[in-house]
Amino acid sequence: MAAAAGPGRRGRRRSLSAEDFLDAALALLDAGGVDAMSVRAVATRVGVAPNAVYTYFPDKAAVVRALVERVIGEVDSGVTGDRSRPWRERVEALALELRKRLTAHPGVVGLVIGAPMDGPNALALNEGVLELLTDAGLGPADAARAHYLLMTYVFGSLALEAAEEGRPGALPPEEERIESRRRVFAAIPADRYPRSAAVAATMAAYVSTDQYVWGLRRVLDGIAAARPGRHP
Amino acid sequence: MAAAAGPGRRGRRRSLSAEDFLDAALALLDAGGVDAMSVRAVATRVGVAPNAVYTYFPDKAAVVRALVERVIGEVDSGVTGDRSRPWRERVEALALELRKRLTAHPGVVGLVIGAPMDGPNALALNEGVLELLTDAGLGPADAARAHYLLMTYVFGSLALEAAEEGRPGALPPEEERIESRRRVFAAIPADRYPRSAAVAATMAAYVSTDQYVWGLRRVLDGIAAARPGRHP
DNA sequence: ACCTGAACACCGTTCAAGT
DNA sequence: ACCTGAACACCGTTCAAGT
């Protein structure tokens, strides 16, 4: 896991690389949430003094940016399939793939929300979504707005799900989340907030992925309705 | 600003209350962002030792929760008007009011995302939205899902706007944000990411409130399309 | 009940020094 | 170029003590 051979490997073996620090950061994030991913902890896990991190990254924010870039890079844009498939299906496949990758590293969700997505992988993802929306028949202006709406929905819903849990940036397994949501909802006083209590009874049963897809489809319907023309 | 007379004001004037700490916390948050709102800074601003905070709040998370509750409480649910108005207009008015209140205290946006909204004011807000959706003709199940979608959109879009800025939880004035977005977009290499660069040219001109309303309307269209029946 | 002084176990970051 | 020891200026929180 550590000490991958660097580019100029002679007898002098390149001891460390930025990737090693990202490995450590991600492992800490997965294990203990955002608070556990301290510069000092990362350094310790790599087996080096705290300030050695600053040889590879200018500051902690740079580590976070690189980490977000890596996870976004793990998203398989191939899931959208070829252009013969309906654009809504293609967007849906990509949204589910994004959800899968981001919930695999729950702590990353909070980081994505907290940092601008301007790295190469993030831009490549943007390009894919924009291509999809262009295929859907949207002009440049509408594609731009629809793209922003879609990203807002995907990242917003993941962030809110994580927030619901109380532990910001941590996203436990789906079953645990349903159970915890049930507890929170059960505590709502039905006499004072009748509608919220009724929602509680309904929502607690929902698997969150179902809700995610439902919301996504409403968004896609809204986008479809805003188009000038034909495409289904 | 400080030392409001407590409930049992005798000659003994009640020196402090939890509200005084929230005043201080909000002021620090507005002035210097989320990092500036430390327990120690809050205490100093109130004019008290750092650990005095723990007489009024069990921990920092409780301060944050109370602060979010206060800001949510400042939302005027009256903007939705009476039931004779079309439900979409009523939702839109509420969404704009929410945006106004939250952008007035930009740092709060990040806090809302990071903590579950389960206080009385948050529940009252939920009730209002659910009532609106019921008036729109949605059954309990659809109202529940639509409510979650709406909240995701409103809070997600505000969080993403703040994130775009690079400074998480801070949301500068609209004009500044447009200028900064223009700079970020201008840095996108058009040869590698042609669509993103095209979007950049389009999006930079948008006032973010316009984009907010556009996205909201697409969401509302999607919700409207999912209803079983009549209402416009 | 309310507040303080002092301390504990942490942070992110810098600086001079070593190889 | 890469890494360390030591330090700086911070955190949130606890504890015993004072009124």
Image: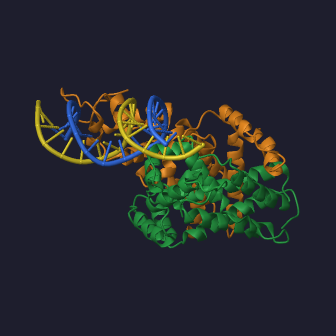
Chain colours: A green, B orange, C blue, D yellow
Give the percent coordinates (x, y) of residue A23: 54, 58
Left or right: residue A164 versus residue B91 is left
Left or right: residue B221 versus residue A16 is right
Residue drawn where x is 25% and y is 41% of the image: B55
User: In this picture, is B174 found above or below A30?
Assistant: above
Give the percent coordinates (x, y) of residue B89: 66, 49
User: In this picture, is A52 found above or below A69?
Assistant: above
Q: Work out whether residue A121 or residue A85 is closer to the camera in this orientation and state it.
A: A121
Left or right: residue B164 versus residue A123 is left
On-image quarter of the N terminus of chain A: bottom right
Give the percent coordinates (x, y) of residue B137: 63, 64
Q: Is residue B43 visible?
A: yes
Which image quarter: residue B7?
top left
Q: Is residue B58 visible?
A: no
Give the percent coordinates (x, y) of residue A65: 60, 48
Residue drawn where x is 60% and y is 45% of the image: B163
Q: Work out whether residue A20 or residue A9 is closer to the camera in this orientation and state it.
A: A9
On-image quarter of the C terminus of chain A: bottom right
